[in-house]
Structures are given as structure tokens and as C-alpha cells.
Image (cartoon, helix red, strand yellow):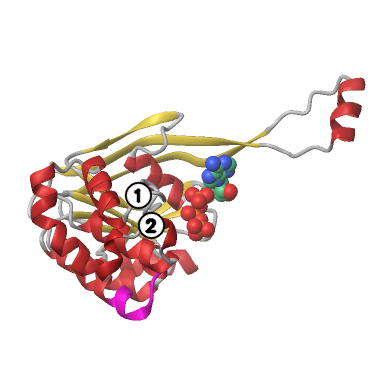
Amino acid sequence: MSAVTTRPSILVQNVRKTFLLRRTHSMKEAFVGWIRRKDIKAREFQALDDVSFEILEGESVALMGLNGSGKSTMLKLISGVLEPDAGRVLVRGRLAGLIEVGAGFHPDLSGRENVYLNAAILGMKAPEIDARFDDIVAFSEIGEFIDTEVKHYSSGMFMRLAFSVAIHTELDVLLVDEVLAVGDAPFREKCRIKIKELAAQGKTMVIVSHDQEMVRELCERGIVIRHGKKVFEGGIEDALVELHG
Ligand SMILES: Nc1ncnc2c1ncn2[C@@H]1O[C@H](COP(=O)(O)OP(=O)(O)OP(=O)(O)O)[C@@H](O)[C@H]1O
């Protein structure tokens, strides 16, 4: 285990997140609703319901749950992509998210321009990016395509470059969401090794993955979410039992 301090790195307190589920209506339905003065309201869906937990600096924790349980929503709240409706989320240090990898990439810019743009968004200064540029490109294996507009990249190439930028930034907290499901087997293996390296360096990690072997290898603890509620928090083996129980 690599935790060297007991300072919390991520604090999640009584977090709630509600989404509005909009129904789609035909013109006829909308018209009939209007005639009958019936209000066609969007239904509310509670994606996260009063969730609290703490992750210490240097810990690797798996967020576990079946499809639709709220894992990705939780990661988006930690990363700040989404705001909670109630409760709060606090993160200490610099955070990089391997979630929605490549979301900041611009299709009309080249790979090189996107590296600079995204590394800057992730908080790096130009000289820092210069110093790491070759490593970023080497890890991504993009080679001579680095000066091609990314709209011409295959989805795998796109993902590799975005992943490479994210893991080469100065980070304290890394959020990983199923990213390793994308990409071919050799690249996935390289990413797995890199993530292990970052964990060994004492980075805090929150990992969402349906890959049990990876979760076992990388995480010492698991938090199980069911229908938006935290139902278990504890050792990874017990969490896996809880998940399938
Ligand atoms: N923007 C949104 N608007 C409406 N509903 C949403 C939105 N985002 C997520 N949801 C709903 O919230 C629930 C939780 O979604 P989330 O993506 O967090 O689940 P998950 O546990 O990551 O699932 P999976 O394992 O399938 O990736 C789902 O029912 C989903 O449909």
C-alpha cells in the first residue's frame, strides 16, 4: 500500500444529484396535452442519493456498481464537470481525469496543437509542455500523424493521444473511468502499467472499471454504489463480494 499520510485527498459529503428525464412528445401529444391543459412535466431521477465517503492521499479506491448505479456521475462530480444539487465535494491538489478523455480536443487542430491546448487546460505551462512533449507523443505512438488534424484520427489514435496528455500532466489525483476498455491490447497493457506506476508514486486514484482483475490489482479499497446509494465501503475483496451478492 502506498498511502504515506492520512490527509484526505477527496471528501464527498452528503452528495445528491438529480437529473431531469425529459420525455419526447410527438406534435400530437403536445397539442392534446395543451388542449386538455395537462402539464407534461419532466420526471426527476435521483442518480446519487446522500452519498458520503473520504479518500486519503495516496489511496487507490474502486467505485463499483452495476450499470446505471451512478459511478460515472460520481466521478464527474469529483472532477467538477458536474455540480451536486446538495452536499459538497472537496479535492486537494491537482486533478486529472481520464473521463471523457479527449473531450477538450478540437477536431480542426492538429495532434500537436491539441497536446498544447489540453495540457494548458490541465494546468501546465508552455515550458513544462515543451519538456514533456516528446514523451507524450512517444507514449501515444502517434508518430508522424502528430501534425495531422485529429478529425482524421481513428478513435483509438484519438484516445491514445488524449490519454497520454492526461497522464503526463503534473497530478495528485487521477480519475479513471473505463478508459482501459478502449484501445488495443498492447496499448491497454501499457496504460495499466503506467497507472500502476502512478499509484506506486503515491498518487490518489479513483477507478471505475468492470474489469475485476484490474480493480484487484490496482485498488486496496472499494466503494459499492447501488441505485445511487452507497451500500458498502471496505476492502476490495469484500467489496467485490458485496457487488455480486
Ligand atoms: N445527463 C443526464 N441526464 C439524465 N440522466 C442521466 C444523465 N447522466 C446520467 N444519467 C442517469 O443517471 C444514472 C447513473 O448514470 P451513470 O453514468 O453515473 O452510471 P454508471 O454507474 O456509471 O453506469 P455504467 O456502468 O453503465 O457506466 C443512469 O440511470 C443514467 O441514465
| Magenta region, residue range | 182-189
Q: Is mark 1 within 8 Å of ligand 1?
A: no
Tell me the chief SS of the magenta region: helix
Name the disc covering residue 150, or none.
2
Name which residue lies at 48% across and 46% down: 229
Crowd around label 1: few <14 · some 14–19 · many ≥20 (10 Å): some
Name which residue lies at 36% across and 68% down: 180
Decide which of tag 1 and tag 2 comes sooner along the chain.
1
Crowd around label 2: few <14 · some 14–19 · many ≥20 (10 Å): many
User: Is 192 positioned to the left or the right of 227 in the image?
Assistant: left
Between 173 and 142, the one nearer to me in the picture? 142
Q: Position of residue 64 (x, y in %)?
A: 41, 59
Q: Position of residue 226 (x, y in %)?
A: 50, 53
User: Is 216 positioned to the left or the right of 28 in the image?
Assistant: left
Between 74 and 228, the one nearer to me in the picture? 74
Name the secondary structure under disc 2: helix
Mark 1 highlights which residue? Answer: 109
Whether residue 79 appears in magenta in the rendering, the answer is no
Q: Quadrant of residue 38?
A: top right
Question: Can the viewer see residue 36 in this picture?
Answer: no
Between 161 and 5, the one nearer to me in the picture? 161
On screen, residue 27 above or below 155: above
> Looking at the picture, which amino acid does disc 2 mark?
Val
Name the disc covering residue 18, or none.
none
Q: Position of residue 232 (x, y in %)?
A: 40, 55
Q: Are marks 1 and 2 in contact (CB under 8 Å)?
A: yes
Name the secondary structure under disc 1: loop
Name which residue lies at 43% across and 57% down: 151
Instruction: Report how far apart the C-alphas of labels 1 and 2 lie in the structure.
Output: 6 Å
